[in-house]
Amino acid sequence: MRRFLTPGDLGDISKALQEAAEVKKNPLSFQHLGKNRTAALIFFNSSLRTRLSTQKAALNLGMNVIVLDINKESWKLETEYGVVMDGDKPEHIREAVPVIGQYCDIIGVRSFAKFENKEEDYSERLLNQFIEYSGRPVISMESATRHPLQAFADLITIEEHKKVKRPKVVLTWAPHPRALPQAVPNSFVEWMKMADVDLTVTHPKGYELAPEFMEGVQIEYDQDKAFEGADFIYAKSWASFSDYGKVLSTDRNWTVDERKMALTNNAKFMHCLPVRRNMIVSDGVLDGPDSIVVQEAANRVVSAQTVIKRILETL
Ligand code: CP
């Protein structure tokens, strides 16, 4: 495997889930694979879970790990071509990426949407530059449009907690004071479409996700109706795709609370974290017995380790 951006990169999803279960059961059984190998984890944006879980996953596999926060610990990088570099960016990505590739065997990259230009964000230029110029396998640790390590962990978590063969899974938009990228909901939808689940997406009008992700997916604009009979509620805020990067609503009627969870089939509550309490979800739901956000975050190690293991097996 040379890249990890979509569920298609893992092939058969049920096999990947079986492999993830094996990795979770025996996390230190594959250390020979990473011996004398190095992972470089490159962050253009902040992280708690992705940074720690991916590092832990690589360490579990016996790898050495280098972590670089580009904005705090490195030269500012120019990403445009044909520019006269007389500003505050002393290094070009065209040299930086192949140089990083010289120091490692696998690269993980985190780079969020900038919300300046939809086409630019959805072209995934930065991630593609790493794929093209690093000479190494590249793992997305959340890019402008996708967060596949999160979505794989979400699917693992649903598999572990489901009580029926084909659970009803509801992705609900929730209010947030700032414009957040569509990467998490895009990937969540993309992965749930590959899984044996009944998926409904609910959000206010104007928050439709990109058509390339939503083809064939049921949208229910009435959140209460969407929650009826749900086995899993997955809350997330995202900015508008059509009115790109804009916050169209902060309506707290969309906050997930105890009344709404009571409409469900004793649903488990999920969120990728970090989460804003009493904006996205009430304290009561988040601290309640059906919240599985910590277990979900724990599975970030499992998803990352399964992916890195696959790559190491092909080196
Ligand atoms: N869910 C997630 O990716 O968390 P971090 O932004 O803290 O890495």
Image (cartoon, grey):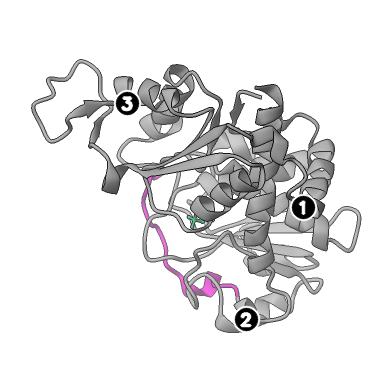
Q: In this view, does 311 lie to the left or right of 110?
A: right
Which residue occupies 52% across, 23% down? Answer: 136
Residue picked out by circle 2:
287
Count residues near mark 1 (Cα–Cα under 10 Å), then give few for <14, some for 14-19, many for 20+. some
The first of marks 1 and 2 along the sequence is 1
Q: Quadrant of residue 233?
A: bottom right
Disc 3 and disc 1: Cα gap in Å?
A: 35 Å
- Disc 3 is placed on an element classified as helix
Residue picked out by circle 1:
24
Magenta stretch prevailing secondary structure:
loop
Q: Nearer the viewer, mark 2 or mark 3?
A: 3
Name the residue type under label 1: Lys
- Toward the viewer: 29 or 220? 29
Disc 2 and disc 3: Cα gap in Å?
A: 44 Å
Name the residue type under label 3: Ala
Image quadrant where one finds the C terminus = top right
Q: Quadrant of residue 291?
A: bottom right
The first of marks 3 and 1 along the sequence is 1
Disc 1 and disc 2: Cα gap in Å?
A: 25 Å
Residue 251: image x %, image y %? 45, 70
Whether residue 7 is visible to the viewer of this picture, yes or no, is no
Q: Tell me: residue 88, above or below residue 47.
A: above
Question: What is the span of residues highlighted in magenta in the rendered image?
Answer: 243-256
- Disc 1 is placed on an element classified as helix
Name the residue type under label 2: Asp
Image quadrant where one finds the N terminus = top right
Residue 66: image x %, image y %? 45, 41
Asked whether 56 falls inside the magenta stretch, the response is no
Q: Tell me: residue 66, above or below residue 81.
A: below
